[in-house]
Image: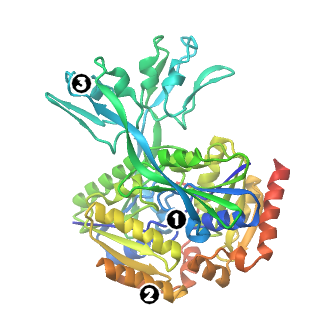
């Protein structure tokens, strides 16, 4: 079984469109949407959810105001500025809290404890083209990298059960935590870029990341004909780095038209 | 005033709006908080005046004092410390720099040291714009602490524009927290709409007022407009899908420099926001 991740560095270069198109063509595959904070693949593949599980990310501090003597030690100790003295006493801001527990330790009144929090949901779904593992991180939550790992584990388990030959992974933009989680241990990274100065800049950084982690990479220039001079610059850059350009895709308004035709809905899962 | 530019979906035009807005105003500071893939400097070509190393704290074990009791490892919520019979291992990529390990250590064997995760660059573009941007080191996973370093450079005397990263998770929260207003950039496609809905929910949690800029107007459908109407979100500006604008973008040229009539539209948008606040 092989795993391929489609990434881009820069957002909006065409990752999801490419993954959906591959999924429609490949056969015997499992699809994984690892853009867990802004997933879009379900808009094209219309998954029917068969399994839904809660994702518990980082814990969160909870304050028992009855026990709190307002000594302020917790506020002082918190590195994330998640505890502050409000009109109604000391309070935890859950969007800032990273669940480290330093406040619990420094409180000598036993007024704070850590609680689990549901930070999102992971799904296993059926689509026309194969089983899909995906997720949705809750609003303003952390630990997106961990949720990516949950999605990838789900995809691997399903692929083994179904005897699939391929896991196709839709990555997220950027080069940080969720991107690295979507790249760990894959057989190939397909980097999709666009012929713009930003596209080239971001391609260089994401190729640095795949090289850093020793992951084989190939490149595809999407809408290569919107600026052919830039496409040549990108091609020369890739040649100089010994990176293969597997395919260039021309700009075609039919792509946007197809989104509407596919009955693409934008209702949250 | 601090105005942040966010989108949920990547590639909708955050940097286009941030850069062209900056060029349409006076006395501006632009903070590019997309530290994973910053792009504003490509358009603004700043003269860099300062480069600062930015880091997070991580534990440093004093092996002369450590008796390998394991309390630090038991306390760490991120499994960033493993204590073996005669060895302590710290996994820097898992460490959040909370400092709990050094607080729980009964022998004061843990101090903290700074580990570089990226750099903050500061420069001037033209006479008018101060640009600050962060650049996350390759292989580093945590963007939010570097974003906080970029935001330490905020100059409240200036009109501050924050270019946020895509998504809805912690790096976005770090970038847009503390803003007086958030401009949401979307495109009129099903993807643009879905991710716009997500970022609107984030702003409700953070209680930041917002309005929408529709980029590439003319492609896709009208559903983004319908949604904005339902939510009572003002449409601040529409930037049409225009081959010329796309070409300028691809060359790294801010389109207001080539099409100066747009400067008034961007400046007018800020006047409108000021009036509403």
Colour treatment of the image:
rainbow
Q: Is residue B177 left or right of residue B274?
A: left
Residue marked by disc 3: B70
Of residue A204 and residue A169, the one placed in the foreground of this image is: A204
Residue A203, quarter of picture: bottom left
Query: Of helix, strand and loop, which one carries label 1?
Result: helix
Of residue B66 and residue A252, the one placed in the foreground of this image is: B66
Chain of the residue under the numbered disc 3 shown in the image: B
Chain of the residue under the numbered disc 2 shown in the image: A
Gap between marks 3 and 1 measured at Cα = 48 Å
- Give the residue displayed 39% in from the left and 66% down from the top: A206
Q: Are marks 3 and 1 on the same chain?
A: no
User: Which of labels 2 and 1 is toward the front?
Assistant: 2
Gap between marks 2 and 3 measured at Cα = 57 Å
Of residue B223 and residue B12, the one placed in the foreground of this image is: B12
On screen, residue A173 above or below B148: below
Q: Quadrant of the N terminus of chain A?
A: bottom left
Return the disc, 2 or 1, that comes first in the chain's sequence.
Answer: 1
User: Looking at the picture, how far across and down is residue A190, in whole percent?
Assistant: 35, 72
Q: Is residue B106 visible?
A: yes
Residue marked by disc 2: A232
User: Looking at the picture, how far across and down is residue A28, in whole percent?
Assistant: 28, 71
Q: Is residue A185 left or right of residue B50?
A: left
Tell me the tag on residue A43.
Answer: 1
Residue A212, quarter of picture: bottom left
Marks 3 and 1: CB-CB under 8 Å? no
């Amino acid at each position: 079984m092989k795993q391929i991740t489609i990434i881009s560095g820069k957002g909006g270069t065409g990752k999801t469109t490419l993954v959906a198109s591959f999924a429609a063509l490949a056969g015997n595959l499992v699809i994984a949407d690892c853009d867990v904070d802004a997933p879009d693949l379900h808009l094209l593949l219309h998954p029917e959810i068969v399994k839904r599980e809660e994702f518990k990310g980082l814990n969160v501090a909870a304050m028992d105001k009855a026990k709190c003597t307002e000594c302020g030690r917790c506020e002082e100790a918190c590195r994330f500025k998640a505890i502050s003295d409000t009109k109604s006493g000391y309070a935890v801001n859950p969007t800032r809290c990273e669940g480290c527990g330093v406040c619990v330790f420094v409180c000598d009144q036993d007024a704070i404890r850590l609680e689990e929090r549901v930070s999102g949901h992971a799904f296993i779904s059926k689509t026309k083209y194969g089983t899909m593992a995906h997720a949705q991180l809750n609003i303003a939550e952390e630990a997106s990298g961990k949720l990516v790992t949950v999605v990838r584990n789900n995809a691997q388990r399903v692929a083994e059960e179904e005897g699939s030959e391929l896991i196709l992974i839709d990555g997220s933009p950027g080069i940080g935590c969720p991107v690295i989680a979507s790249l760990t241990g894959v057989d190939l990274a397909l980097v999709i870029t666009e012929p713009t100065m930003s596209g080239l800049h971001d391609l260089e950084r994401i190729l640095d990341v795949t090289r850093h982690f020793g992951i084989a990479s190939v490149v595809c220039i999407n809408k290569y004909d919107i600026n052919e001079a830039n496409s040549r610059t990108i091609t020369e850059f890739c040649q100089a780095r010994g990176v293969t350009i597997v395919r260039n895709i021309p700009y075609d308004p039919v792509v946007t038209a197809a989104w509407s035709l596919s009955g693409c809905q934008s209702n949250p899962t | 005033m601090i105005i942040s530019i966010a989108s949920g979906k990547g590639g909708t035009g955050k940097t286009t709006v941030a850069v062209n807005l900056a060029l349409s105003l006076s006395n501006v500071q632009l903070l590019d908080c997309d530290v994973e893939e910053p792009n504003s400097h490509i358009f603004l070509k700043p003269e860099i005046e300062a480069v600062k190393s930015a880091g997070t704290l991580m534990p440093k074990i004093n092996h002369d004092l450590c008796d390998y009791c394991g309390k630090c490892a038991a306390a760490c919520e991120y499994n960033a410390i493993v204590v073996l019979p005669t060895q302590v291992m710290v996994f820097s990529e898992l460490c959040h720099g909370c400092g709990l390990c050094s607080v729980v250590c009964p022998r004061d064997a843990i101090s903290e040291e700074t580990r570089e995760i990226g750099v903050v660059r500061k420069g001037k573009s033209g006479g008018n714009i101060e640009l600050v941007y962060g650049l996350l080191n390759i292989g580093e996973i945590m963007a939010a602490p570097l974003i906080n370093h970029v935001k330490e450079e905020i100059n409240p005397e200036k009109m501050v524009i924050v270019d946020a990263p895509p998504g809805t998770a912690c790096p976005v929260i770090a970038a847009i927290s503390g803003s007086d207003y958030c401009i949401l950039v979307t495109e009129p496609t099903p993807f643009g709409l879905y991710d716009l809905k997500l970022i609107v929910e984030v702003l409700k949690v953070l209680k930041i007022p917002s309005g929408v800029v529709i980029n590439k107007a003319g492609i896709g459908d009208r559903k983004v407009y319908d949604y904005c109407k339902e939510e009572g979100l003002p449409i601040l500006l529409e930037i049409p899908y225009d081959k010329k604008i796309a070409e300028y973008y691809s060359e790294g040229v801010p389109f207001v420099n080539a099409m100066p009539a747009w400067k008034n539209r961007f400046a007018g948008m800020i006047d409108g926001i000021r009036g509403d606040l």
